[in-house]
Image: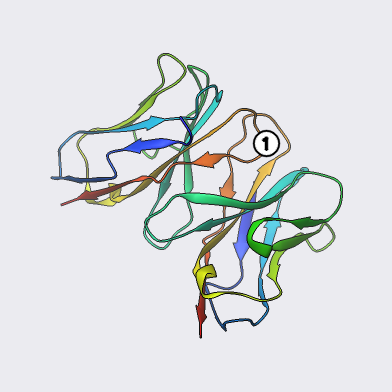
Amino acid sequence: GAGVSQSPRYKVAKRGQDVALRCDPISGHVSLFWYQQALGQGPEFLTYFQNEAQLDKSGLPSDRFFAERPEGSVSTLKIQRTQQEDSAVYLCASSQTTGGGYTFGSGTRLTVV
Amino acid sequence: AQSVTQLDSQVPVFEEAPVELRCNYSSSVSVYLFWYVQYPNQGLQLLLKYLSGSTLVKGINGFEAEFNKSQTSFHLRKPSVHISDTAEYFCAVSENQAGTALIFGKGTTLSVSS
């Protein structure tokens, strides 16, 4: 596609509910990143894929967070047993190469009530 | 470890005035430096980036930034701002390696009024 597409744009979850956030990167982009942006803060790194391989997941805040990219294109970020502190905008970015800047999606705003 | 400090959380300016948004970084290795803009309820858009070469980098929408290695700074400037420049601006750094994530500052809110 022309850009990085994320869905849903908005998600309201009850505390304890599981959620799945989808990222559809630009076709052919090898690298894919997930970031978490809390209100009034800069984005913080969660995890990184190169094709289908998850090369870095050091930013995932707990074992409730899980990401996958099974065919090296679409990626899903799953959060189990959501908690209020998970409320944030989740941004996905992709790139053909690394180190040269990335194209970001519009994000998914998750609100846990 | 890398870090980015954006020295001003909010910068109010009048239309057609010049503006500078300050960014300092810390890193023990060579870095790539970026400025992104975020409009309300939108993702991040790349304004400009420094990878190597000339320390003065020109970006979109009339913005430019200067990489100063001795002062570890990468300040963003525009000689004359417009109302439409009102947005959140983020400075970011990554190491000069493949597959390294961006480290972002906390952002600067630029508010342009008439």
> Image quadrant of residue A30?
top right
Whether residue A64 is visible here, answered yes or no, is no
Measuring 39% from the left and 36% from the top, which residue is drawn there? A5
Q: How far across and how far down the image is residue A14, in percent?
A: 13, 45
Viewed as shown, does residue A22 lie left or right of A48?
left
> Image quadrant of residue A22?
top left
Q: What type is the residue that disc 1 sits on? A: Gly
Q: Nearer the viewer, residue A36 or B39?
A: B39
Q: Nearer the viewer, residue A113 or A91?
A: A91
State the residue position of label 1: A99
Whether residue A97 is visible here, answered yes or no, is yes
Q: Does B101 appear above or below A44?
A: above
Viewed as shown, does residue B68 lie left or right of A1?
right
Q: What chain does mark 1 sit on?
A: A
Q: How far across and how far down the image is residue A51, in percent?
A: 52, 18
Q: How far across and how far down the image is residue A103, in percent?
A: 54, 40
Measuring 58% from the left and 73% from the top, which residue is drawn there? B8
> Image quadrant of residue A24?
top left
Measuring 41% from the left and 53% from the top, which residue is drawn there? B42
Q: Nearer the viewer, residue A16 or A21?
A: A21
Secondary-structure class at tag 1: loop
Q: Residue furthest top?
A: A71
For the image, the number of numbered tags is 1
Q: Residues within 10 Å of mark 1 (few under 14, many from 20)?
A: many
Q: Does A53 appear above or below A2?
A: above
Colour convention of the picture: rainbow
